[in-house]
Image (cartoon, rainbow, N blue to C red):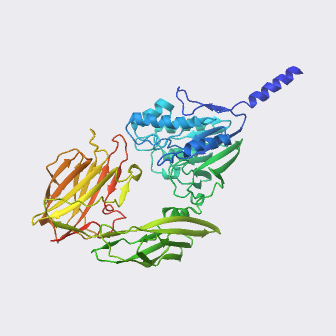
Amino acid sequence: MHRITFFFFLFAFFSLKAQFSHDLKDDKKPFTAEPNFAGEKFRFVVIGDLTGGEESGVFDAAMDRLNELAPDFVISVGDLIEGYTYDKNEILKQWDAFNNSVAKLEMPFFYAAGNHDLTNEMMKAVWKEKYGKAFYSFKAGKTLFLILNVYDLENKGFSKDQIAYFEAILNNHSVNDPVFVVLHDPFWNLGRLEGYNEIKTMLAKRNAIWFCGHEHRYLYREIDGQPHYMLAGFASGSYLESDPSLGVFHNFLHVNVDGSKIRIANLELEGLLPPDIVNDANEKQVNFLRRGSWAKITPSVIKSDDEKVINSIMTLKNSSDFPFEISGRFEALESVSFEPESLQEFIQPNAEIQIPVRLTADYPFQKDNLPEVKLNFTGKIFQNEKLLQTKSQTKWIIDSWFYSHPKTDEVVFSGLLKPAEVEEDWDWTGNDDAAFQLAVMHDQKHLYLHIKIHDDKFVSDSRNLNDLLSVFFQPDTAFNAMNPYRFDFSSGKEITDQKSGKSAMKAMFTHIQTEDNSQYVTLKIPGKTLIKNAFRINLSYLDVDNPSNMDHSVLWWKPAWGSRNDYPQSGIFIIKN
């Protein structure tokens, strides 16, 4: 009798023993430890992106919250480090910092790779050295986990080895048992990638649930009967205002598995949320509100220094499928009044309205001291008796014509030019980081464009990745004029002359670096290229603070010509005698 009881106890013990298994043979594994749970019951947490603008302190604080929930393990959807660099030492530092935070977890952590983690071949090699395979699988009881690598190929996609591996794994897995699929990019965006059709086919009739990230916004979508969860940024996004109803918040998913019964809770760091808070039914309205493009004011360009009144048109657009209410007002400016001061409009679906706006000042506007006009708005959509609401801000760009003055021996530069746009603005910290000034003069035969570049660190790299000033010159001031002259000035390189690519024009310039973190460029342009007594100029500056990085800020004096933000008469100079 005691022997029977003993064997029954052994049977019960081993039947409840941890059910985790994997087929990884390498010493390095893409998880910190093996989870310890019993039978077919376990809980895990899925977290979204950390990088692409990681918010300081959020990730470390979230580790404490995960410990409080005490799941059996945690798994990511990728983008764990900032990446985007050729500097191996920098990548190792980033991984060390990440792993120091993960070490605070009291349960195992499973790695998945995103574009920030596998940006180039060096980073792929580092991943292999530290974690082994970037695509892998494991089982928890009867539940299968597939961790896909979207970046297995050079140009993004799934290699034949990856497809064959998962096909073999699935062939040994019951069709009815759960499959959790983890990948970085939303699978519905990958239709053109190599291997997409094979992955889709092998999972088509499976009991699959998908987790992804990449876009830093939350969305629930059901495709062919399979639920897809796109997680918002876990510790990234730098949201101006967290708003779960727009899919903009720090979220993670808490998954409870009990055999074939699966429950998924959508959590914000501050509380619980419905899993389908953003779904196919409201995504169009949510994206419309998120983009904040529902209010625009046509830029205004004044032509003299004695104007006190500026008129423009505000366009309010509703591209959603439900009525849209917009309310807002101009930010107050001293000695300036607006007409109207505030707005409250109701716009029907897929419609737009235009409203005249006027700015009146107590003093004439000076081109060196033009007002910065901001409009703050709240947009509301009632969809099926549920309120979707967000706040946004748009700017009324007020610009002016500029003048070319007769040439003198002294070059008088403008003040620091405020860039209209900054690409990769996360990498630009302001005028102390990089800025430019401009002076324009002429004589009877030539135009002289003098540019002064300020930079905290001028870079001239062996791979020819240098700080780069680009000057765009267009003698035709018509807005639709094409093919401008372009001149590139690379940091640290002395050039005596350069052709713009048009044989009709050859410009001479000098390039001098000073000791006060400045470089001077003088561009000498033949006056005969002008059609009238006016021309158009734009400047851009590529600021390479760290040559090993792959993304660098680009400052544009005026919006890039031909871009959607470009506007008539920006950067126009008049020859003034």
Q: Residue furthest top?
A: 3
Q: Quadrant of residue 285?
A: bottom right
- Compared with residue 93, is residue 198 higher up or lower down, i.e. above or below? below
Nearer to the camera, 300 or 213: 300
- Give the image location of residue 484, x and y in percent: 23, 62
Q: Residue furthest left?
A: 444
* One can see residue 59 in this view: yes
Q: Residue furthest right?
A: 1
- Give the image location of residue 324, x and y in percent: 55, 72
Q: Residue at x 57, y 71 (%)?
A: 322
Q: Quadrant of the C terminus?
A: bottom left
Compared across the picture, whether 247 is left or right of 515 comes to right
Compared across the picture, whether 434 is left or right of 493 comes to right
- Compared with residue 311, is residue 438 higher up or lower down, i.e. above or below? above
Nearer to the camera, 501 or 524: 524
Q: Quadrant of the N terminus?
A: top right
Compared across the picture, whether 4 is left or right of 431 comes to right
Compared across the picture, whether 39 is left or right of 475 comes to right
- How many numbered markers are drawn? 0
Q: Residue at x 58, y 47 (%)?
A: 211
* One can see residue 204 in this view: no
- Compared with residue 269, is residue 35 higher up or lower down, i.e. above or below? above
Nearer to the camera, 486 or 159: 486
Nearer to the camera, 130 or 330: 330
Q: Quadrant of residue 57?
A: top right
- Give the image location of residue 150, x and y in percent: 48, 43
- Give the image location of residue 244, x and y in percent: 59, 57
